[in-house]
Image (tube, coloured by chain):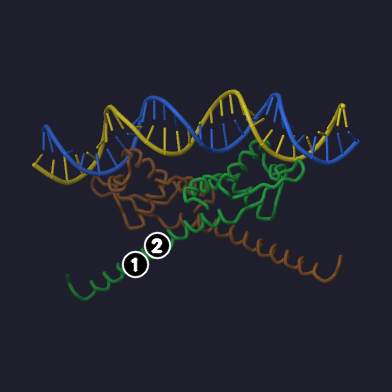
Chain colours: A brown, B green, C yellow, D blue
Amino acid sequence: MSKPDNLDAIFIALSDPTRRAILARLIEGEASVMELAAPFAMSQPAISKHIKMLERAGLVSRRRDAQRRPVKIEGPALKAATDWLESYRKVWEQNYARLDALLNDLQRAGESPKN
Amino acid sequence: MSKPDNLDAIFIALSDPTRRAILARLIEGEASVMELAAPFAMSQPAISKHIKMLERAGLVSRRRDAQRRPVKIEGPALKAATDWLESYRKVWEQNYARLDALLNDLQRAGESPKN
DNA sequence: TTTCTATCAAACCACCTGGTTATAAAAATG
DNA sequence: CATTTTTATAACCAGGTGGTTTGATAGAAA
């Protein structure tokens, strides 16, 4: 379902501290735009634009409640990013461990024979 | 050492498909700029700029080998991003599970009493 | 030394970002 | 109805991105 190109939008969305703070707030539950804007020294349209980028990335979704448009965090996009990173980190760690073992082997081999 | 603001640079670096592909290549081991540029229909300076952004984020480092500047992947920055994402995803999953349980409770409670 | 190879740096471009203000629309409230 | 609240949209601006071409530099190789 979720295209891999989506990673572009997801990582772009995560690259701004304001948007990461909004996500942090949303972890505690749904919030309206005004509620999300409150902690920031920033205009409401600025927050709306941040929300739009989070939405484009699939990291949040919006409901309708009278004039309010409560924003909710969405797990799957968060998972897509985590999965991508985790897979790379895992391979890197394996290679790192292998290199480490190799270096140890070389060192040990050099201890008794002269060349 | 690694500042948390660093997450900005890390996620920005990860938000471009060319840079993610470069990282994917580097997982297999060190590579020179020319080697990294080869698979892409893109000029060498463009690749150099991508590498610079990866380096700024601490995701890669460069050695010197004659005229060559081999690039190597760096684990810790990758880990910083993974950790951030993992922590949020964990809380989200907990809340999700809690909400799920709550909804089940409500449904079960509604089965025998009328209101 | 001259030449070739690998890389970087500068100048330039179109486009996106992150913010602003001002305005409009939609629904609640008086 | 008029007003207030909540949100979105448009127009604008400074600065960053992602690419280009052109030219400089460092080191190997002829």
Indicate the position of residue A83 as horizontal and vertical percent values: 53, 59
Q: Which mark is residue A8?
A: none
Please indicate whether residue A43 sits to the left or right of residue A7 in the image: left
Tell me: residue B51, above or below residue A29.
above
Circle 1 residues within 10 Å: few <14, some 14–19, many ≥20: few
Looking at the rendered image, the quarter that the C terminus of chain A falls into is bottom right
Q: Quadrant of residue B76?
A: bottom right
Secondary structure found at label 2: helix
Residue at (30%, 51%) from the top-left corner? A31
Circle 2 residues within 10 Å: few <14, some 14–19, many ≥20: some
Give yes or no for contact between labels 2 and 1 (Cβ–Cβ under 8 Å): no
Q: Toward the viewer: B37 or C28?
A: B37
Q: Which mark is residue B98?
A: 1
The three-letter code of the residue at mark 2 reads Val
Please indicate whether residue B7 sits to the left or right of residue D28 in the image: left
Indicate the position of residue A51 as horizontal and vertical percent values: 37, 45
Secondary structure found at label 1: helix
Tag nearer the camera, 2 or 1: 2
